[in-house]
Image: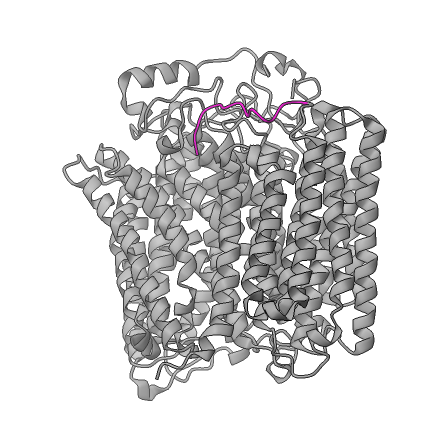
């Protein structure tokens, strides 16, 4: 496949494709990207001069529901990959749609929370809490949205028979991305919503 | 990181990384851990040890996702080294800034 | 995958090899060949070197006498800001990347980097980002808040206008190129080494590229996020760095230096890599303590993360934090010192040849050590309080960045030029280049230690006659002009030698590494067949050399299949730059529209086959 090593005569040193090594490297980089966003939120905890304050507006129950939805979308993602590898095209597409749907539910729930918080008076400009919260979670949402578009393209390619089991790595790498976005949310859920 | 060609045993074309049942189990465990976290959040008796419990539980969730959903357990360890560089620095970054901002200002030396 | 046999289908414009290579403009725009990209990086960085240098010259003329006002304070602010920004992001880093690009595949025995098109993308983003940043002068809105861009100097309130917008958007664009480059080189080194090229057999330059790449992918995201915060503050009224709303300007300093200090090692480690290859070659001895030099490099990379607050002693972080950072900063001098002793021990008892490359390497040892020592001086917090923001600091970091990073890269220029061009750089001109550099550089920056200790603050457009530092400033200005002459000599030497330099064979220096086993200049496919490596100095072992050269010097009937040229990298790079530039409008739907060309060109890129059809890839 196209992403095989340029030095075509021998396999890669690790036996893993360049794409996979490169993508894990990119994820290592993303760790620091979100690390900076998360630490900024942590640093600004309790520094907001005006309300609303986190404990007044966060609904842990709602967030738990959206978090669980995102967790299960990761499950759907591994099942999609499994089906691609077993050449069950229809099932694979089905699971990819489940991923997209759960990602969509997550986004809708989170945007509803946004609207609620804005109602309470928490905006990007209202306090350090507002700025760091919206930029952190907003960046995460952009990642989720990008992942959903990616899954959509994969579903389309599966439908057109462009991803035989031999090329399942295309789905695997998209999966790595999706799981990573999920991991980041696991961390955000604990650090932002649960730890006082 | 070892050199030379090493076929990755767990990685073959069309070959599954794990069984469907295992994936579902992991998913269930993740959900359960999440509910435990939320329970810890609500149980007032645990307030004084809440932070360490939550950190341990969410770390466990992260490790489960990385090892099983992302198959890092079955991959060449070069990938672990690369990704761990990012994770270690992530932990370092968050810890260092939290210490500088939340811990040190509370300590009076002189 | 056997690809050699199927090379027949290569497309037109694909042959970039030795004879009859396609040298038209289009072939350069669409190239994905790491060697051509390297040359473009080098040339572009050299152009920016002159642009940044001219700014420094104007600064030096302005500081010739106390209380002069040849230029306005506002213009002075723009000049020193853009001098720093240009020299670091558009000269030192890309100049090092030029060497990464040319050498890493050759040194590990690969035909190209892991992601050739991504590599081209990195270059074009660097070029467009650099042009974008520099174009700010045309609008008389060049960045003016220093290369560190401390909050609140950069806030919408204190920096209205586009100056700071150019800065934060320009650096964001350049960051994308750096991260892509880091990913590319890590993957290349992890995955694409020739048979037998174990990690611990790699030349030191490749090792340092590897460490630097990790620093790139981990440090750049931090500044990217800090710049995003700044952008939200400026354009959308967020309050990250607004003290009146509880924001903390010191957080900017933390984030900036969390990036900025690893950045220092991003600049210096490639130079360390270069001289770790040059010194053994011209001493005819293997590098003394190879594993120690490798581990010291890795250690520097790691400890480099724990020292950032030594840039912030004057902030008042308290005794505990200050003590920690003092200790960490002094500790990092240890692996650096270890390396210096290793290089000296390599020369010890060797048959040393003082070519220009060797002169620059030894010059680095001397000059960098001076910078290292002044670094240890202000690693101590109480001393630092006296030296902070004075010319002493200016002297220090020019000693490590010019005397370290740039001298190392110039050593590399003289060392590898024969490989790139097939001709030697002129040694007489080279010696002129070296000695004018040494004299000019030291004359410029050594007096700054004194003017700094006497209290002359940096970043101020003039100084009081009462300070009595005129003489140091005049020496510095004279030195700067000598230094400028050295740069002209260098370019003259390159141009002259490229056309009519003395011819060089495949291994003119009798060097030990793999890149010297192939013709100079190399074929576009580098290696006709991949050699098998058995040791750290393969070309110094007779049997191994013969077996390698039997493969690498072979004439092939059918060339190996190489990736297709592509013009999507330049299109995508342009789209990315454009989409970021649109952020300046501050209108959310214009910014959203800017994503469309990025999306379209990414899609076109993904749909285009990377390799010729039917090549087995």
Residue C246, image x, y percentages: 61, 81
Quadrant of the rendering where the N terminus of chain C is positioned: top right
In the picture, measured across the screen, residue C202 lies left or right of residue C510, that is right
Residue C494, image x, y percentages: 42, 42
In the picture, measured across the screen, residue B101 lies left or right of residue B107, that is right
Q: Which residue lies at the image location 63% right of the left edge and 13% below the top edge?
A: C6
C187 to C333, vertically: above or below: above
Residue C499, image x, y percentages: 44, 35
Residue B12 part of the magenta segment: yes
In the picture, measured across the screen, residue C97 lies left or right of residue C167, that is left
Name the image quarter holding residue A179: top right
Name the image quarter holding residue B15: top right
Q: Which residue lies at the image location 51% right of the left edge and 65% below the top edge?
A: C256
Residue segment shown in magenta: B1-13
Q: Residue furthest left?
A: C349
Q: Which residue lies at the image location 63% right of the left edge and 73% below the top edge?
A: C240
Name the image quarter holding residue C14: top right
Residue A23, image x, y percentages: 61, 40
- Return the residue nearer the eye: C436 or C415: C415
């Amino acid at each position: 496949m196209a992403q095989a090593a340029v030095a075509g005569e021998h396999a890669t040193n690790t036996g893993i494709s360049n794409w996979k090594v490169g993508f894990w490297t990119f994820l290592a980089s993303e760790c620091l990207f979100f690390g900076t966003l998360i630490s900024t939120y942590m640093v600004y905890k309790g520094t907001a001069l005006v309300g609303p304050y986190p404990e007044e507006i966060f609904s842990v129950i709602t967030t738990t529901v959206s978090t669980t939805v995102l967790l299960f979308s990761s499950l759907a993602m591994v099942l999609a990959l499994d089906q691609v590898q077993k050449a069950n095209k229809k099932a694979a597409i089905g699971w990819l749609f489940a991923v997209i749907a759960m990602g969509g539910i997550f986004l809708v729930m989170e945007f509803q929370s946004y609207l609620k918080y804005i109602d309470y008076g928490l905006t990007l400009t209202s306090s350090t809490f507002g700025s760091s919260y919206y930029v952190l979670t907003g960046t995460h949402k952009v990642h989720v949205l990008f992942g959903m578009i990616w899954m959509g393209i994969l579903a389309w390619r599966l439908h057109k028979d462009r991803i035989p089991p031999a090329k399942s790595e295309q789905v695997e790498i998209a999966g790595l991305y999706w799981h990573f976005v999920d991991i980041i949310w696991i961390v955000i859920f604990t650090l932002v919503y649960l730890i006082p | 990181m070892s050199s030379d060609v090493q076929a990755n045993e767990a990685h073959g074309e069309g070959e599954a990384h794990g069984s469907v049942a295992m994936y579902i189990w992991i998913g269930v465990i993740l959900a359960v851990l999440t509910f435990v976290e939320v329970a810890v959040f609500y149980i007032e008796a645990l307030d004084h040890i809440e932070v360490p419990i939550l950190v341990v539980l969410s770390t466990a969730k992260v490790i489960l996702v990385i090892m099983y959903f992302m198959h890092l357990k079955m991959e060449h360890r070069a990938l672990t080294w690369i990704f761990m560089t990012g994770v270690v620095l992530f932990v370092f970054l968050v810890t260092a800034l939290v210490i500088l901002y939340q811990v040190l200002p509370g300590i009076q030396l002189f | 995958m056997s690809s050699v046999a199927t090379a027949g289908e290569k497309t037109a414009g694909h042959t970039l090899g030795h004879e009859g290579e396609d040298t038209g403009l289009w072939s350069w725009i669409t190239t994905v060949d790491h060697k051509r990209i390297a040359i473009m990086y080098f040339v572009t960085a050299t152009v920016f070197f002159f642009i940044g240098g001219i700014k420094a010259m104007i600064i030096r003329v302005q500081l010739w006498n106390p209380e002069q006002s040849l230029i306005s304070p506002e213009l002075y602010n723009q000049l020193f800001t853009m001098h720093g920004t240009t020299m670091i992001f558009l000269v030192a880093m890309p100049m090092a990347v030029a060497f990464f690009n040319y050498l890493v595949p050759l040194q590990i025995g690969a035909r190209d980097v892991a992601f050739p098109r991504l590599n081209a993308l990195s270059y074009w983003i660097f070029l467009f980002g650099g042009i974008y940043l520099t174009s700010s002068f045309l609008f008389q809105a060049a960045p003016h808040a220093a290369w560190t861009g401390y909050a609140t100097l950069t806030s919408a309130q204190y920096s209205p206008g586009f100056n700071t917008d150019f800065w934060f958007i320009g650096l964001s664009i350049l960051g994308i190129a750096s991260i892509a480059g880091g990913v590319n080189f890590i993957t290349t080194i992890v995955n694409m080494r020739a048979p037998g090229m174990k990690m611990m057999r790699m030349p030191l330059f490749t090792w340092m590229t590897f460490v630097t790449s990790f620093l790139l992918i981990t440090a750049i995201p931090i500044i990217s996020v800090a710049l995003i915060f700044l952008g939200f503050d400026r354009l959308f009224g967020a309050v990250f760095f607004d003290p009146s709303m509880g924001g903390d300007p010191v957080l900017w300093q933390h984030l900036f230096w969390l990036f900025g200090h690893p950045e220092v090692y991003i600049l210096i480690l490639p130079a360390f890599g270069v001289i770790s290859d040059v010194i053994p070659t011209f001493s005819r001895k293997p590098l003394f303590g190879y594993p120690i030099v490798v581990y010291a490099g890795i250690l520097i990379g790691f400890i480099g993360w724990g020292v950032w607050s030594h840039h912030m002693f004057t902030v008042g972080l308290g005794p505990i934090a200050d003590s920690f950072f003092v200790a960490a900063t002094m500790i990092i001098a240890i692996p650096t010192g270890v390396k210096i002793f290793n290089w000296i021990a390599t020369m010890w008892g060797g048959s040393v040849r003082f070519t220009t490359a060797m002169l620059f390497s030894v010059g680095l040892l001397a000059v960098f050590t001076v910078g290292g020592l002044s670094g240890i001086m202000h690693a101590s917090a109480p001393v630092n309080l006296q030296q902070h923001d004075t010319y002493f600091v200016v002297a220090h970091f020019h000693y490590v960045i010019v005397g370290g990073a740039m001298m190392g890269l110039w050593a590399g220029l003289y060392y590898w030029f024969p490989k790139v061009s097939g001709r030697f750089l002129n040694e007489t001109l080279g010696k002129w280049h070296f000695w004018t550099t040494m004299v000019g550089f030291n004359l410029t920056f050594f007096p700054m230690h004194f003017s700094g200790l006497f209290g002359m603050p940096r970043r101020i457009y003039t100084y009081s006659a009462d300070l009595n530092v005129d003489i140091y400033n005049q020496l510095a200005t004279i030195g700067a002009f000598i230094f400028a002459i050295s740069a002209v000599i260098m370019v003259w030497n390159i141009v002259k030698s490229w056309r009519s330099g003395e011819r060089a064979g495949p291994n003119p220096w009798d060097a030990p590494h793999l890149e010297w086993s192939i013709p100079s200049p190399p074929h576009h496919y580098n290696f006709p067949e991949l050699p098998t490596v058995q040791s750290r100095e393969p070309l110094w072992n007779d049997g191994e050399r013969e077996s390698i050269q039997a493969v690498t010097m072979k004439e092939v009937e059918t060339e190996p299949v190489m990736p297709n040229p592509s013009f999507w990298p330049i299109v995508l790079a342009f789209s990315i730059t454009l989409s970021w530039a649109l952020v300046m409008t501050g209108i959310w739907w214009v910014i959203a529209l800017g994503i469309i060309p990025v999306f379209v060109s990414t899609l076109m890129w993904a749909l285009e086959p990377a390799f010729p059809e039917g090549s087995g890839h």
